[in-house]
Amino acid sequence: MSAAPYDTVVIGAGPAGYTAAIALACAGCRTAIAGPPHNPGPDRDTRTTALLQASVQLLRNTGVWEGCREHAAPLRTIRITDDTGRLLRAPEVVFKSSEIGDEAFGYNIANTELVAALRARAKTLPNLDIIESQGATAIEPSDKDVRITLAEGNMLTARLVAGADGRRSLARQAAGITARTWRYDQMALACNFSHARPHDDASIELHRKAGPFTTVPLPGKRSSLVWVETPGEAKRLLTLGDEAIALEIETRLQGCLGQISNAGPRAAFPLSGMSVHRAAAKRIALVGEAAHVIPPIGAQGLNLGFRDAAALAQCAGTALAGGGDPGGAGALAAYNKARRNDVASRIFAVDLLNRSLISGLPPLQAARGLGLHLLGGIAPLRKAFMRQGLAPRSGLPELMRRCAP
């Protein structure tokens, strides 16, 4: 059975997929999103996402933010400390959102709460259909449209497919887009925990030899943690009981947040990277981890995916409004151009920072230390870095601008 043709179909129902579907619908596209239902259970995702201001603005402009607000904590200060113990150590650097006139750099929210808010908003949009499915089994592009076969046997047809189906993307394969992948000898441990002292809306980022140890505020006296370690150490940490892992976290933080408790369910995943030579082809546009994968450093991952979603909505919506084809060559070329430099620069910067931490080469360590020293000591440079890296305002898609309707 084949459904009536859509302007766009989004494959994948994670945060990037739902954001893309909502943005496309708000841009005037008749849209469907196909993916598994949102049913948090005992194996629920314990990760959080620090949404930077442009991403928060996207959620505001699409009517999602009201469902997120009470579950999110503001991020107003970022404190970076060199905890490598090496001879060439960088000075501590503190970034404050007030320096650039912003109330906060962004807000941290649990992924489950974010998806729930996105899904609730999606249900209210008349031109967006939610199709619960275990995923696509075939994606077949042609000159005029794309046919999608779902695991349950039903078929969808669309002029444009947004592939938000993760790093093993079937959509990317169907588009004939090749990916370059690489691995790091690191694993990231993720969990949330309680602490005795208030976090004061501050993120603590300890740069250690194995990788960064980063806490990000949650509502109340709670924070999320991404702890990058060697694979062997990460696996050891996973075997510890709740009290033992809480003590490990407290020791690493050197008492900054007081006594640690309730270090909830923990998960660990290997760090890797991926990039593609283009973001769209054959009526298929890639969004989120179907298009790029980077280590969890600097809150760049999902924020890149949100910029994908907003840019794709703008390109498809512009084509549709002009009587054109949202999946045509012109719209895809515009999307490729819109995402090329942003994605490439973020991948390069995050990869370089991560390798500078784990590398034993003194020149690379010295370069990192010098860079942080300049950021800490030269206010105009620090403000420029914050505006570009944490609160960019230029070159954003319309849905991420404060002047959007």
Image (cartoon, helix red, strand yellow):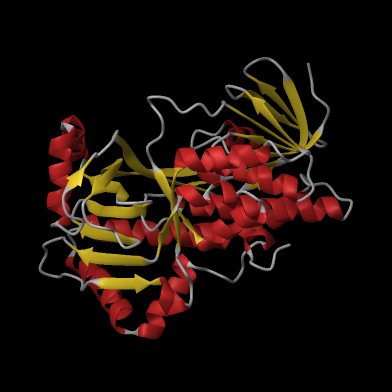
Which residue is depicted at the point 74% across and 45% down? 25
Q: Is residue 108 left or right of residue 172?
A: left
- Give residue 3's quadrant in the image: top right
Q: Quadrant of the C terminus?
A: bottom right
- Quadrant location of the N terminus in the rendered image: top right
Taking depth in this image into account, of 350 and 263 the one nearest to the observer is 263
Between residues 228 and 159, which one lies in front from this camera angle?
A: 228
Where residue 243 sits: x, y (%)?
A: 14, 36
Measuring from the top left, give residue 292's x and y in whole percent.
Answer: 49, 47
Compared across the picture, whether 142 is left or right of 289 comes to right
Where residue 186 sits, quadrant-wise, is top left
**Residue 278 seen from this side:** no
Closer-to-camera residue (273/112): 112
Above or below for 188 versus 393: above
Q: Position of residue 354 (x, y in %)?
A: 30, 56
User: Please, is residue 351 above or below residue 15 in the view?
Assistant: below
Question: Is any atom of residue 253 visible in this view?
Answer: yes
Above or below: residue 314 compared with residue 82:
above
Residue at the image position 59 percent from the left and 25 percent from the top = 135
Q: Residue at x 38, y 78 (%)?
A: 382
Q: Residue furthest right?
A: 323
Residue 156's spot in the image, x, y percent?
75, 26
